[in-house]
Image: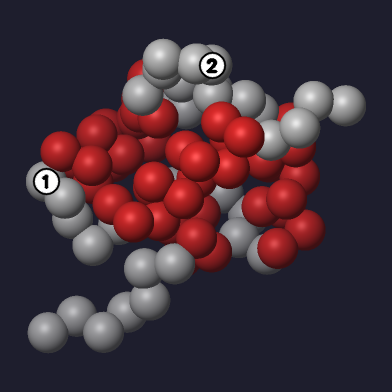
Amino acid sequence: MNTSPHDLSALFDQLGLPSDMASINSFIASHELPPGTRLPFASFWTPAQRQFLKEALNEDAEWAEAADEIAMLLSTRQSH
């Protein structure tokens, strides 16, 4: 049984992105998920990140909840 965390910080690690809260908040502030765009198809992902997110969501993998959280944060962020 895999007991590794599957939270937002760990997902950022999996995506090869800085995973401290300041970096996560900066990513959220500087990226937006356009209405009607599924998370894996956002233009800011690399091909490898896109593939990982597709698999996580399609397979309802352990990462799906954290991926849904990123999608929600990117969809509801306030414009500055």
Protein image colouring = secondary structure
Q: Label 2 sits on what residue type?
A: Pro
Quadrant where the C terminus sits is top right
Give the camera-side residue of 10 and 71: 71
Question: How many marks can you see?
Answer: 2
Place of residue 46 in the rendered image (x, y in percent of width and height, measured from the top left): 44, 27
Quadrant where the N terminus sits is bottom left
Query: Is residue 16 in sight in this rendering?
Result: no
Q: How packed is label 1: few (under 14 Cα within 10 Å), some, or many (20 or more)? A: few
Place of residue 44 in the rendered image (x, y in percent of width and height, measured from the top left): 54, 23
Give the camera-side residue of 71 and 17: 71
Q: Residue at x 54, y 16 (%)?
A: 34
Give the quarter of the image for residue 20. Answer: bottom right
Please tell me which of labels 2 and 1 falls first in the chain: 2
Query: Is residue 52 in sight in this rendering?
Result: yes
> Label 1, on which residue?
59
**Callout 1: helix, strand or loop?**
loop
Q: Residue at x 46, y 50 (%)?
A: 69
Place of residue 36 in the rendered image (x, y in percent of width and height, measured from the top left): 41, 15
Horizontally, is 9 left or right of 30 in the view? Answer: left
Horizontally, is 40 left or right of 62 in the view? Answer: right
Give the quarter of the image for residue 38. Answer: top left
**Callout 2: helix, strand or loop?**
loop
* Residue 7 in the image: above or below residue 67: below
> Label 2, on which residue?
34
Q: Residue at x 23, y 62 (%)?
A: 62
Give me the disc on residue 75.
none
* Residue 9 in the image: above or below residue 32: below
Work out which residue is located at the far right of the displayed protein and give it: 80
Q: Label 1 sits on what residue type?
A: Glu
Place of residue 47 in the rendered image (x, y in percent of width and height, measured from the top left): 36, 25
